[in-house]
Amino acid sequence: MLEYFDGNYTWNMAVNLAFAMGASPGDLDDACRSLRPVARNRDDAAAEQWFHAWCAVGDRLLRMARSAEAAGHRATAANRYRRATIQFVQAERMQSAHFAGRAGAYAQMLECFAKFIELGNEPCQRVEVPYEGTTLPALLVPPRRAAGQGTPAPCMIHFDGLDVTKEILYLMGMPGALAERGVGCLVVDNPGVGESLRLRGLHNGPEAERPARAAFDFLAARPDIDERRIGIMALSLGGYHAPRAVAFEPRLACAVAWGAQYDWGVIQRGRASDPASSLPVPHYWDHVGWVFGATGMDEIMRASSQISLVGILDRIRCPILVAHGENDRQIPLSAAERVIAECVNSPRRDLIVQRLADGGAEHCSIDNVPLICETIGDWVADVLGTTDKA
């Protein structure tokens, strides 16, 4: 993994994630160069400096994007809005839930992403998935190839993790990788993440089958989607949500855990007892409490202990893939091995370990995202029957 900052895993993960979304090296260096002296501090002041540095580059790109749009240069404007999206989303997600500037940066991110989609003619449609009296914001990406004219296509539901958003997932390229292989993708801000948390107040919880069922019903009602070939995938904390969903929603055709989870309560207790733990975001416990609507460590630990696949994996009766990095510093490889070992009734259970020798060995292969997009995309195409092998 690229280690831009000395001794700050969390910040280095964020830089790698920005590159995975297609950030310009120059943009990132402009945002990060002045932060190097404070990287080891890991305090509120350093996080706030991160926010202002990344937003400053985002503001510059937004100004340049608007200028290009006014001049009628749509392609240039779209690309600059895309780069601004990356800056704002990474500024926002690295702050405390209570940080005053967070809401404004998130709103700017949504504006820039919408402009990127519009002006860039991206094959991406914003949709709302009906869910328990409200809706889940989502992005629907159609397949680029279909088996035949008018033939309903397979589709993957794609949930977020603990701290990413549907816009991040779109820019990371998984929906595009699936589309190239004849598979649509519905990228959903499930409860506890993205707009569902920030603008609708929906918190995460153990019953992943509830939002998964809503997403399935939304897709099954569409004439362009083959309801027999709708699967689900998710990354990081979503390595719990995807297996849990197929365990309790048998209509789903397959599951992909992009980074394994097995018993998150055990992981959380380990993190609480080890101040040197590798964490995905600053203000980690504040963020987890926000995601689950929990106050204080006792409530956070009770909520975390419910995120467990122990005793339910034998319910899975569809193909499942677990993709995990050999050098994952957040979740041990043993979690992936246990998930696969306990899917005893799955007709196809595959564990793909991204090795250091090949790349993509960090958490969710953040150090080589194109590689994992290809790997998962090929598996999904094989399972859902879209691969044409010459």
Image (cartoon, rainbow, N blue to C red):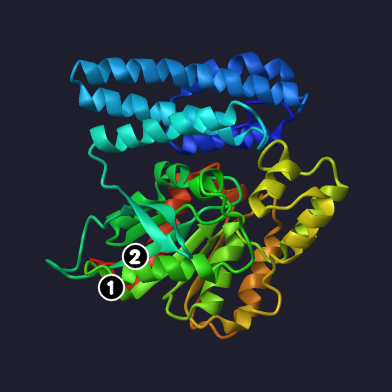
Residue 381 visible to an observer of this rendering: no
Residue reaching furthest to the left: 149
Mark 2 is surrounded, within 10 Å at the Cα level, by few (under 14), some (14 to 19) or many (20 or more) other residues, namely: many
Residue in the image at 59% along x and 19% along y: 52
Residue 106 picture location, percent across and down: 50, 33
Q: Is residue 376 left or right of residue 68?
A: right
Mark 1 is surrounded, within 10 Å at the Cα level, by few (under 14), some (14 to 19) or many (20 or more) other residues, namely: some
Q: Is residue 231 left or right of residue 77?
A: right
Whichever of labels 1 and 2 marks the residue nearer the N terminus, that label is 2
Residue in the image at 73% along x and 60% along y: 303
Image height of 49 relative to 340, above or below: above
Residue 107 picture location, percent across and down: 46, 32
**In contact (CB < 8 Å): disc 1 and disc 2:** yes
Residue in the image at 35% along x and 24% along y: 80
Residue 22: mark: none
According to the picture, the residue beneath numbered tag 1 turns out to be: 226
Which residue is at the front of the view, 254 or 157?
A: 157
Figure quadrant of the N terminus: top right
Residue reaching furthest to the front: 133
Figure quadrant of the C terminus: bottom left
Residue 72 picture location, percent across and down: 18, 20
What kind of element bears circle 2?
A: strand
Residue 44: image quadrant is top right
According to the picture, the residue beneath numbered tag 2 turns out to be: 155
Q: Amino acid at mark 2?
A: Cys
Residue 336 picture location, percent across and down: 64, 65
